[in-house]
Image (spheres, rainbow, N blue to C red):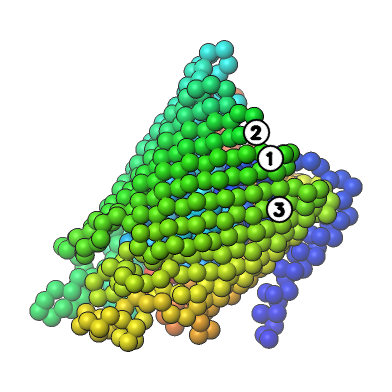
């Protein structure tokens, strides 16, 4: 074993030992902190310290204090998460959780399933940070409550709450909160946003508009392997409109609706191959326009020991891309669900749910069989037996294309004391084949079976006096792996498949561990807040080859100080070597810094924001032959009033 590798493997456990020692010494000073309530783990509100699953939350305040300027970079600040992007902001972006592929990350926006059914994954560049109230991330399996694709994890994005905490208007009085922001920066970057929230008695509503744009950088490096380099700037612009409204029909009965509409226009480098020579022509102006929408209508009620929910949702991704030859892909998802909960006794809850999902793809590239329907039943139980918390859930999915699949998850959490707990979780998962994998001409095979997975994880958490550390170890085995096979024997015996096809073959093994530690929650000049995290990821296919774009080792450090009225923050990210198609990707330490300052009583509600992204100007290659932006400067103002 090399000294550097031994160092990487030893340091995380050194952090854990130091954290355990500190918290043990501080044990008498344990402070009770407010409970963080999450829903992504089980679809029911649960306190985070009672979960048997691994969940992390980014609040709206935390989002505002991050130097990140997009959703993917905010997620990359979390342990267990790696980001893959073909260029800078506005370019196609995917999120890998615990070494799993992008198609194994399920994304929900206000509870609505999102993403392209043709590619089988969600593009995180289509939604910006403005207007997001909260992000919950389940690191690990979630198929037993969400169905297909929740293999590596689940990302639940919640847009601005229609009634923020403390905004209730008793006795019929009205309340209004407004906000606005403007910023500008390097490469012609700009952002404008405005929003308002209003409540009147039992009614409330909110509206948010955001515009973001950048001239961008030349995304593809010279001398790339496919000859796609075009010496132009690949910029983007994105417009987002969000609206929501709610009505408290009666005490404990609420109806709520929301919609998000986003349009992303981005330029990218590619090539067309025109006859008679079919030589690549990369000098054309390639662009993509993607319209994304998520709309939902929900009803929630409670009476005594019973609670119930009904929901309807619709998610659409409509994309057109190319230069002279345009390809269009439109995914439409309509979903409905009923959920019934029953508190059997204090600390014991039972939930049953029915869900219906209909997916339809329209494209000018090939014909599809129309709608793919999925009906599912879920049953879940959570119970507390003294210091032991138990969670068990199971789900049956019946799909019109790939048949019936059953998944389950069982977990237990032991609270050894008010500050120390351990957990153990086992689960099964599956990933549905995408429409491209099923039907794309010369590639898709309609008889593909879904991937199936089995996972096991364990964790330990300890906290004291505002400090906390936790460690998790996990292993996930994926069978029936779907990928490209160059062997015609695996393909239909047709001339179109002479060079291979999509096929089920082999398996992948994903294993690793994460160690996290963080300090006090409130920053000051002498006692800053900090969060340190390490990920060790070993993701390999059935032949033992490392899966592409995964860093074996990854460190993150976040800190915040308050000095002379300035709130100073920084985020450090270091990754070990990542490889793709046999080549090592250029990488380096990325450092983002930010300074925030309230402008004082003369300008109440106003705050100045200064930030520098990639402050070290590292030459980062997020994917083979692609370039991330260098050092960028931003300055902006935010206002929030009532």
Q: Answer with mark 2 or mark 1, whichever residue precedes in sequence.
A: 2
Which x, y percent locates residue 335? 39, 46
Residue 173 % position (x, y): 53, 13
Q: Residue furthest left?
A: 276
Residue 390 marker: 3
Of labels 1 and 3, the one closer to you: 1
Q: Secondary structure at mark 1?
A: strand
Q: Secondary structure at mark 2?
A: loop
In the image, what residue occupies the spot 81% across and 42% down? 31
3 vs 2, front mark? 2
Viewer-closest of 363 and 70: 363
Q: Is residue 97 visible?
A: no
Q: Are marks 2 and 1 in contact (CB under 8 Å)?
A: yes
Q: Which residue is mark 2?
A: 305
Counting other residues with Cα less than 10 Å from the Cα at mark 1, is it few (<14), some (14-19), or many (20 or more)? Answer: few
Which sits in the foreground, 159 or 249?
249
Q: Quadrant of residue 47?
A: top right
State the mark number for residue 344. Answer: 1
Q: Earlier in the sequence, mark 1 or mark 3?
A: 1
């Amino acid at each position: 074993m090399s000294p550097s590798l031994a160092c990487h493997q030893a340091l995380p456990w050194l952090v854990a030992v130091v954290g355990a020692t500190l918290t043990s010494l501080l044990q008498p000073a344990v402070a009770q902190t407010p409970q963080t309530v999450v829903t992504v783990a089980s679809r029911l509100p649960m306190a985070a310290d009672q979960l048997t699953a691994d969940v992390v939350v980014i609040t709206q305040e935390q989002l505002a204090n991050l130097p990140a300027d997009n959703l993917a970079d905010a997620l990359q600040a979390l342990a267990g998460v790696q980001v893959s992007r073909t260029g800078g902001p506005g370019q196609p972006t995917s999120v890998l959780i615990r070494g799993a592929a992008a198609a194994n990350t399920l994304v929900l926006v206000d509870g609505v399933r999102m993403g392209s059914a043709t590619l089988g994954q969600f593009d995180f560049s289509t939604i910006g940070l403005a207007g997001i109230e909260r992000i919950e991330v389940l690191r690990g399996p979630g198929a037993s409550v969400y169905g297909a694709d929740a293999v590596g994890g689940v990302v639940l994005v919640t847009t601005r709450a229609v009634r923020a905490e403390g905004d209730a208007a008793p006795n019929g009085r009205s309340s209004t909160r407004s906000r606005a922001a403007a910023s500008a920066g390097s490469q012609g970057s700009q952002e404008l946003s405005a929003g308002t929230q209003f409540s009147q008695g039992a009614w409330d509503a909110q509206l948010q508009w955001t515009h973001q744009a950048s001239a961008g950088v030349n995304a593809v490096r010279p001398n790339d392997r496919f000859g796609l380099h075009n010496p132009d700037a690949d910029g983007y612009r994105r417009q987002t409109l969000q609206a929501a409204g709610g009505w408290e029909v009666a005490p404990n009965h609420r109806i709520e609706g929301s919609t998000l509409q986003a349009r992303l226009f981005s330029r990218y480098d590619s090539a067309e191959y025109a006859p008679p020579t079919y030589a690549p022509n990369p000098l054309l102006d390639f662009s993509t326009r993607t319209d994304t929408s998520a709309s939902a209508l929900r009803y929630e009620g409670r009476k005594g020991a019973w609670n119930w929910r009904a929901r309807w949702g619709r998610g659409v991704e409509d994309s057109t891309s190319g230069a002279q030859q345009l390809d269009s892909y439109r995914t439409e998802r309509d979903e409905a669900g009923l959920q019934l909960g029953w508190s059997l006794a204090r600390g014991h809850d039972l939930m049953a749910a029915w869900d219906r999902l209909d997916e339809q793809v329209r494209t000018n590239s090939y014909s599809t069989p129309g709608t793919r329907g999925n009906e599912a039943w879920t049953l879940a139980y959570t119970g507390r037996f003294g210091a032991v918390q138990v969670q068990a859930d199971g789900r049956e999915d019946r799909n019109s294309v790939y048949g019936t699949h059953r998944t389950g998850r069982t977990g237990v959490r032991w609270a050894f004391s008010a500050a120390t707990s351990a957990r153990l979780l086992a689960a099964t998962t599956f990933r549905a084949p995408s429409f491209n994998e099923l039907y794309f001409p010369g590639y898709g095979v309609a008889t593909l079976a879904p991937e199936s997975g089995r996972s096991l994880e364990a964790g330990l958490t300890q906290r004291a006096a505002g400090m906390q550390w936790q460690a998790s170890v996990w292993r996930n085995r994926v069978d029936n792996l779907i990928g490209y096979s160059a062997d015609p024997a695996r393909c239909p015996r047709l001339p179109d498949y002479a060079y291979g096809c999509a096929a089920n073959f082999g398996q992948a093994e994903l294993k690793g561990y994460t160690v996290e530690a963080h300090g006090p929650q409130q920053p000051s000049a002498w006692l800053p807040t900090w969060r340190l995290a390490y990920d060790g990821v070993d993701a390999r296919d059935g032949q033992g080859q490392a899966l592409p774009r995964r860093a074996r080792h990854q460190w993150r450090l976040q800190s915040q100080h308050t000095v002379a009225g300035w709130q100073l923050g920084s985020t450090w990210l270091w990754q070990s070597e990542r490889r793709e198609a046999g080549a090592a990707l250029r990488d380096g330490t990325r450092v983002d810094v930010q300074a925030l300052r309230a402008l004082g009583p003369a300008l109440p509600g106003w705050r100045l924001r200064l930030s520098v992204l990639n402050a070290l100007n590292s030459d980062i290659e997020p994917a083979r032959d692609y370039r991330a932006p260098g050092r960028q400067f931003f300055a902006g103002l935010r206002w929030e009033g009532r």
